[in-house]
Amino acid sequence: MIHTHRTNLAIVTVVTLLTCLGLFSPQSLAAGESVKNPRITDGSNVTLLFQLAVPGEQRFEVRDSGKFVQGQHQLLPALERVVTGMKSGDETKVELSVEEAFGPYDGRKKTTVPRNDLPAQTKEGDVLEDRSGNPATVTQLSDTAAVMDYNHPLAGKPLVVKLRILRVDNPS
């Protein structure tokens, strides 16, 4: 297409006018992009893929997808901080210390209960709920008693978490 001097002048004039009105600028283009691919802020509904692993433990790895609402403490606090500002398609790897993950292991969070208080098919490693609805892992089982551990199964362990943000829906 051939542009005359007059056509070029008209284009420059229109772009200048739109820029003066704030309708054409790098910021307005970026704002348009953020509407298409919003960043995670408080209240964002987020869908993600995640992979959890305990360093040095070959037998433990979880790969799954999930949803959460940013700022409602549905994730570990360290992970909420990391995902703030991320957008769909972003990926990250986070190494969490014991304290940032599920905290240190507390040996006082064990109790012994009569074996007949448990379901008949219970075996070591099962996670059961007590009468109050609190989850506990059966760590030892004999004919007469069972040791119930109320620590989170990952307590006392650092974690490596890989995240991939699939979708961000902001509340506005």
Image: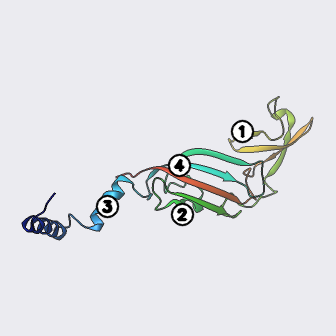
Residue at figure coordinates x 74%, y 39% from the top left: 128
Question: Where is residue 100 drawn, in percent x and y?
Answer: 65, 63
102, above or below 115, in the image: below
Mark 2: amino acid:
Arg
Mark 3: amino acid:
Ala
Q: CA distance from mark 1 to mark 4?
A: 34 Å
The quadrant holding residue 120 is: top right
The tag earlier along the polypeptide, 2 or 1, is 2
Residue at figure coordinates x 29%, y 67% from the top left: 26
Crowding at label 3, few (<14), some or many (≥20) Cα neighbours within 10 Å? few
Residue at figure coordinates x 72%, y 60% from the top left: 158
6, above or below 88, in the image: below
Mark 1: amino acid:
Arg
Q: CA distance from mark 2 to mark 1?
A: 35 Å
Verify CB contact (< 8 Å) between mark 3 and mark 2: no
- The residue pinned by badge 2 equals 81
The tag earlier along the polypeptide, 1 or 4, is 4
Q: Which residue is at the front of the view, 172 or 51? A: 51
Q: CA distance from mark 2 to mark 4?
A: 15 Å
Verify CB contact (< 8 Å) between mark 1 and mark 4: no
Q: CA distance from mark 3 to mark 2?
A: 23 Å
Foreground mark, 2 or 4? 4
The tag earlier along the polypeptide, 3 or 1, is 3
- The residue pinned by badge 1 equals 131
Q: Is residue 15 left or right of residue 170?
A: left
- The residue pinned by badge 4 equals 48
Question: Where is residue 48 drawn, in percent x and y?
Answer: 53, 49
